[in-house]
Image: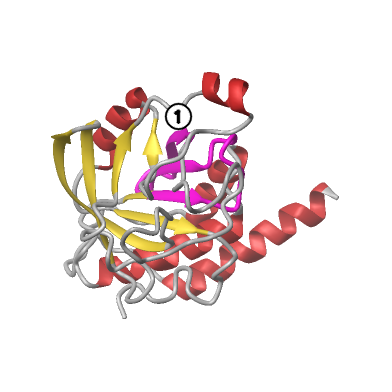
Amino acid sequence: MILRTSARITMLVLASLAMFGPLRASPRPIRAERLDVMALAHASQRVGLRPEVLRLALRARNRAAARGLSTRPVLTVIDYSLPSRERRLWVLDLAHARVLARELVAHGRGTGDDRAVRFSNRPGSLQSSLGTFVTGAVYRGKHGLALRLRGLDPGLNDRAEARAIVIHGAPYVSEAVVAKLGRLGRSQGCPALSPAAAARVIGLIGVGTVVFAYHPLRPEQSGKTAGG
């Protein structure tokens, strides 16, 4: 079983290498960013990020980088197919094949209870959006420190700015809330973290990096439209 799983991971990683080629954070080559996909895949899998989700996230990030929209070798992945009570947000250091953070993240109240089952790009839906985002300005608002998100996928998440979809901290995101409710609290559509995690993650990912939100409910669009 272990050998079959390792072989499957290797095949996915090799396919990713063949598909992506060298990743660049801007139109100009950056020597420091030579992505070791194999090492990144193994490091990610050890902390619960599945190879197939990583592959889609890397593809999306590559397309954003080709447009000069991703300026640093940092990638954030959210796997909304996992329940909210699990840590389903990862921050990856692509240049050094490291996982910098793994955190709890809430989805919108219109998206579901513990499980995310509905997604929308529509203002007022209170639902989370899928696809590829690039981070914008850091600011301090009603939730404290927050980070703006710009959706890159037409029809899927391109109203993120108009909907004020941002990364922010919230008191309803914690292990204590999970112990009490069996799930996290829910946002108005934002990927909300605990206040402490929000400050740490925003500091790690900063401006000009990709956030990729995945769910197999929309596999035909996840990771495919960014940059198009």
Residue 96 belongs to the span the image colors magenta: yes
Left or right of residue 128, residue 116 in this image = right
| Nearer-the-camera pick, 12 or 224 | 224
The location of residue 85, given as percent across then percent down, is: 59, 34
Seen as rendered, the residue at the extreme front is 124
Q: Relative to 218, say whether 138 is above or below.
A: above
Query: In this picture, which residue range is highlighted in magenta?
Result: 76-104
What secondary structure is found at the residue carrying circle 1?
loop
Instruction: Please name the colour scheme applied to the rendered image.
Output: secondary structure
Q: Which residue is mark 1?
A: 173
Residue 86 vertical position relative to residue 77 in the rendered view, above or below = above
Kind of residue at disc 1: Val
Residue 88: give x, y in percent of width and height. 53, 42
Foreground residue, 120 or 194? 120
Question: Which quadrant would the C terminus be assigned to in this image?
Answer: bottom left
Q: Residue at x 49, y 67 (%)?
A: 17
Q: Quadrant of residue 162?
A: bottom left
Q: Residue at x 61, y 39 (%)?
A: 46
Q: Which residue sits at x=40%, y=42%?
A: 187
Q: Quadrant of residue 215?
A: bottom right
